[in-house]
């Protein structure tokens, strides 16, 4: 079992000063995560998604963190792989440089960046995003294994060129794909790359997704592999706040998750902007349910199909509370088939002190429990 921390750089009250502080806070958390025994950090690329994600240049953030750490793996994931966001060769060049300078610590994940807000900013054709992500992965896998890259595909042609520098890891850093649907899990398995799975729906849903991934692995014949190296790693998201006061941890965690869910609902489903007001003494579980009802109503109003993925972010059953509760929840994730637990701590309304204390509790109590096991 591996443990990591994932960063979106979420921001309530998005002033310039607060934005700058949140980025610095994420760096502090990432460096501290190494001290606390975490195996990896992940930083997710998004563009123009106010509130939800201010991490527009994760390769710069990760370079800064890599320079201040020694052992923790550096997860550049997910990168928005459609060509309008990032040319595949530029992804390969930047990732190889980061892998080289970090001493071979890089992992690379791919995603679509498929919101209208992001694609309209960068002139991305939304109808081509899935095909471009797959083609980019093929180009990157080839660029790192051949002396000169030459590629002629359905969407792009590249005449022979060397792609420099070469990464420190041979033949290249492990590859992953962001997966929120059965179709993407099947694709990840068929491409021979790891799955980065949204885990808001809980362990039972994770077990079902793992079954889909494993079934696709069992029947694949290797014809769609993007590289000579196969990575079958299954990583799942785990929202968590852990404090000495379990009730306070649950309140803070549910409030942060409500902000996260409302922010993602705004950009992915046209829901209202996230509620930045913190209501003193609010029943956060009830507020989370009320927010879910509002988003579902808004999606129906816009004639957007309401799928489980649309509402799973409002599920309140996560690793909130004391260390024992977090351990019990991770046990459920392990039984569901998780190879890695990606801790989501930095949610928009969660104070830096609670983030740092959560990482400390995981480092001193939660992770050692599974290392012993």
Image (cartoon, rainbow, N blue to C red):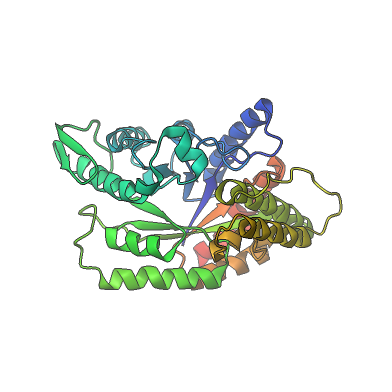
| Depth check, front residue: 85 or 272 | 272
| Furthest-top residue in this view | 17
Question: In the figure, is residue 90 to the left or right of 11?
Answer: left
| Residue 218 location (% of width, % of height) | 28, 73
* Residue 210 appears left or right of 367: left
Which is more toward the observer, 129 or 95? 129
The answer to whether residue 22 is above or below residue 315 is: above
Q: Residue at x 60, y 37 (%)?
A: 50
Q: Look at the picture and state if 100 lies above or below 360.
A: above
| Residue drawn at the location 62% of the way across and 28% of the way down | 20
Residue 84 or residue 9, whichever sits in front: 84
Q: Position of residue 6 (x, y in %)?
A: 53, 48
The quarter of the picture where residue 140 lies is top left
Query: In front: 179, or 210?
Result: 179
Seen in the picture, residue 59 relative to 357 is either above or below; the reply is above
Numbered-mark total: 0
Is residue 304 found left or right of 322 in the rendered image? left
- Quarter location, residue 108: top left
Can residue 171 be spotted in the picture? Answer: no
Q: Is residue 11 visible?
A: yes
Task: Tell me where residue 77 appears, x and y as whole percent.
Answer: 43, 45
As drawn, 362 above or below 327: above
């Amino acid at each position: 079992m591996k443990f990591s921390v994932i960063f979106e750089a979420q921001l309530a009250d998005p002033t310039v000063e607060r934005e700058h502080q949140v980025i610095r806070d994420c760096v502090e958390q990432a460096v501290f995560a190494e001290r606390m025994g975490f195996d990896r950090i992940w930083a997710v690329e998004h563009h123009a998604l106010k509130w939800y994600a201010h991490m527009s240049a994760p390769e710069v953030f990760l370079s800064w963190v890599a320079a201040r750490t020694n052992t923790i793996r550096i997860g550049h994931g997910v990168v928005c792989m459609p060509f309008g966001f990032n040319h595949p060769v530029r992804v390969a060049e930047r990732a190889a440089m980061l892998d080289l300078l970090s001493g071979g610590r890089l992992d690379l994940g791919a995603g679509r960046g498929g919101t209208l807000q992001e694609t309209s900013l960068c002139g991305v054709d939304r109808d081509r995003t899935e095909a471009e992500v797959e083609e980019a992965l093929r180009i990157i896998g080839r660029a790192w294994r051949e002396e000169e890259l030459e590629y002629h595909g359905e969407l792009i042609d590249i005449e022979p060129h060397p792609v420099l520098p070469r990464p420190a890891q041979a033949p290249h850093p492990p590859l992953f794909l962001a997966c929120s649907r059965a179709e993407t899990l099947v694709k990840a398995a068929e491409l021979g790359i790891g799955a980065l799975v949204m885990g808001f729906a809980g362990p039972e849903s994770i077990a079902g997704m793992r079954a889909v991934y494993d079934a696709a692995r069992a029947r694949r014949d290797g014809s769609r592999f993007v590289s000579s190296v196969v990575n079958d790693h299954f990583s799942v998201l785990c929202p968590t706040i852990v404090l000495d006061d379990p009730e306070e941890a649950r309140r803070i965690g549910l409030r942060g998750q409500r902000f996260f869910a409302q922010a993602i609902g705004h950009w992915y489903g046209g829901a209202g902007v996230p509620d930045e007001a913190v209501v003193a003494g609010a029943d956060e579980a009830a507020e989370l349910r009320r927010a879910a009802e509002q988003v579902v109503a808004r999606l129906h109003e816009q004639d957007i199909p309401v799928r489980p993925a649309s509402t799973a972010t409002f599920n309140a059953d996560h690793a909130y509370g004391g260390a024992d509760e977090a351990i019990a929840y991770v046990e459920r994730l392990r039984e569901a088939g998780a190879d890695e637990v990606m801790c989501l701590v930095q949610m928009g309304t969660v104070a830096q002190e609670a983030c740092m204390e959560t990482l400390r509790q995981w480092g001193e109590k939660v992770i050692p429990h599974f290392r012993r096991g």
